[in-house]
Image (cartoon, helix red, strand yellow):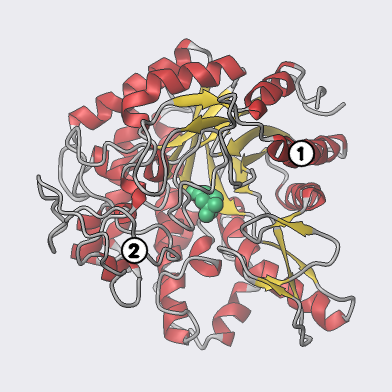
């Protein structure tokens, strides 16, 4: 019992937080070079970018400048670069890093392609060959060690040129730009990559990232739904095209595990929780797995007075033809919802809410809830009955290098152990779980905070928030522990 033979154990990263080489190899600047997801108040290292989004050869450092007023994506275009743009330099370390992943016994490695490395502006006719060759080398290197790449095509990093020229996914033209990009990568990497994810945490548009103002007005909400709809159509077209280009391709959706519980057994809370899950989670899952908007979508639109979303008959046909092969999600925590007044709240990045008295919390205010992972796996599988992957899970923690030069991260091992047990229990209960890629298997920049000190890795990277560090890599204690877990197919915890 437990994990099936051939289970894909591995780790996950994203170009926008890991890759670096942001202005090398013909890459264009991306949205995520300018923002970390909304919560950084003080950019630490700032390189000058002019208003057209062009990087200047000699960076000017503005340590004392505050974040432009408002701090949203658009304000960031005024000339600030965020720590993501450097990541932890996979670009120059990929051979070394992949060797370390192989030493741990990885069967799968999740990474993303930076769109602006393939199409620097996003709307040009021909791709950037140097960018194409970079990823080809990476995929070959993975294959050398029999590590299966799992590739996210879009992980928050839309080319900045598109954002400036067309607005951020508020324009139908994005569908064609994205599909062209997908066609290029499906064609170029045919035979090298089989597992693909279209949009990372697609439901974040609705439930987490502060992309369109504060989201409280109906108008803001409509923008989010429009953005999502264009991504649904782009994703469905990509799925269809990916199957046509290579019938071996397996293409999945990827959602943030926005799993909630009713805070009390008051039926009003039960109903509130059901509707919250519908809005924050099932709305995106249903469209991508069933190929049609769910019945409750009409309630969501009605409640926000939205009567004229730009959804055409042709779009509905496209959604039907582009259902995904697998359902994948990130799982970090659960949150509670209630209709009652409560003062017992918890603050964290991406996670302000009601404190669950049965759970403990991470240093960043995220509820530690391994059983919620089992619960969500069983609930999702029950609904969709297609293979599942947990493609992000992990503990963001402060790590210190001890005098012996080692990182004794037993707290991380203590985090993983019950989560892996929970997945095993879900498998025993019939869930077809095929992969587990832990988040930030090597230290990288936090999406929510832009910090280096929020570390997730089994591998420590010498890089710090003040800009110091030589980027050297070294295994933490959890590295050796995870190696044993993989060797024993999840039995030796
Ligand atoms: C998810 C993102 C990742 C990752 C993770 C952890 O939302 O897909 O990119 O960063 O969250 O979040 P954070 O970096 O804020 O700790």
Q: Residue at x 20, y 45 (%)?
A: 28
Numbered badge on residue 43: none
Q: Which residue is mark 2?
A: 169
Which of 135 and 94 lies nearest the eye of the viewer? 94
Give left or right: position of 370 versus 196: right
Residue 466 drawn at (x, y percent): 37, 49
User: From where the camera sits, is residue 355 visible?
Assistant: yes
**Is 257 above or below relative to 420?**
below
Residue drawn at 19 percent across, 50 percent down: 123
Quadrant assignment for the C terminus: top right
- Badge 2 marks a residue whose secondary structure is loop
The picture places residue 25, in percent across and down from the top left corner, at 19, 32
- Can you identify the residue that label 1 sits on? 414
The answer to which quarter of the image holds residue 160 is bottom left
Residue 20, image x, y percentages: 32, 38
- Up-down: is 188 above or below 54? above
């Amino acid at each position: 019992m437990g994990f099936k033979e051939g289970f894909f154990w591995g780790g996950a990263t994203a170009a926008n937080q890991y890759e670096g080489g942001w202005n090398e190899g013909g890459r264009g600047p991306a949205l995520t070079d300018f923002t970390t997801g909304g919560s950084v108040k003080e950019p630490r290292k700032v390189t000058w970018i002019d208003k057209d989004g062009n990087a200047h050869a000699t960076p000017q450092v503005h340590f004392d400048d505050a974040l432009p007023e408002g701090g949203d994506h658009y304000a960031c275009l005024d000339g600030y670069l965020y720590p993501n743009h450097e990541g932890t330099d996979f670009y120059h370390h990929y051979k070394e890093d992949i060797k370390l992943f192989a030493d741990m016994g990885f069967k799968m490695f999740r990474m993303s392609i930076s769109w602006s490395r393939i199409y620097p502006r996003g709307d040009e006719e021909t791709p950037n060959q140097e960018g194409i060759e970079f990823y080809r080398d990476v995929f070959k290197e993975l294959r050398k060690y029999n590590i299966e790449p799992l590739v996210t095509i879009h992980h928050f990093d839309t080319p900045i040129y598109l954002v400036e020229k067309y607005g951020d996914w508020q324009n139908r033209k994005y569908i064609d730009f994205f599909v062209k990009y997908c066609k290029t990568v499906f064609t170029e990497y045919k035979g090298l990559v089989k597992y693909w994810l279209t949009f990372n945490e697609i439901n974040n548009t609705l439930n987490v990232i502060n992309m369109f103002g504060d989201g409280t007005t109906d108008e803001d909400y409509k923008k989010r739904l429009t953005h999502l709809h264009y991504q649904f159509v782009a994703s469905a077209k990509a799925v269809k095209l990916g199957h046509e280009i290579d019938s071996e391709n397996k293409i999945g959706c990827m959602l943030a595990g926005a799993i909630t519980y009713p805070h009390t057994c008051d039926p009003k809370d039960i109903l509130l929780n059901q509707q919250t899950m519908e809005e924050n989670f099932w709305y995106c899952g249903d469209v991508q797995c069933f190929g049609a908007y769910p019945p409750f979508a009409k309630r969501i639109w009605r409640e926000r007075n939205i009567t004229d979303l730009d959804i055409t008959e042709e779009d509905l046909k496209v959604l039907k033809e582009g259902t995904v092969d697998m359902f994948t999600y990130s799982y970090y925590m659960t949150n509670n919802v209630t209709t009652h007044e409560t003062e017992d709240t918890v603050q964290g990045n991406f996670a302000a809410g009601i404190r669950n008295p049965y759970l403990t919390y991470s240093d960043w205010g995220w509820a530690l809830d391994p059983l919620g992972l089992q619960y969500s796996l069983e609930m999702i599988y029950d609904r969709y009955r297609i293979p599942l992957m947990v493609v992000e899970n992990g503990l963001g923690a402060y790590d210190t290098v001890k005098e012996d030069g080692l990182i004794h991260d037993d707290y991380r091992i203590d985090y993983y152990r019950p989560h892996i047990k929970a997945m095993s229990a879900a498998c025993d209960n019939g869930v077809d779980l095929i992969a587990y890629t832990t988040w930030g298997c090597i230290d990288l920049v936090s999406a929510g905070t832009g910090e280096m000190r929020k570390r997730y890795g089994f591998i420590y990277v010498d890089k710090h928030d003040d800009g110091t560090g030589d980027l050297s890599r070294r295994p933490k204690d959890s590295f050796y522990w995870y190696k044993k877990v993989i060797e024993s197919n999840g039995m030796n915890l």
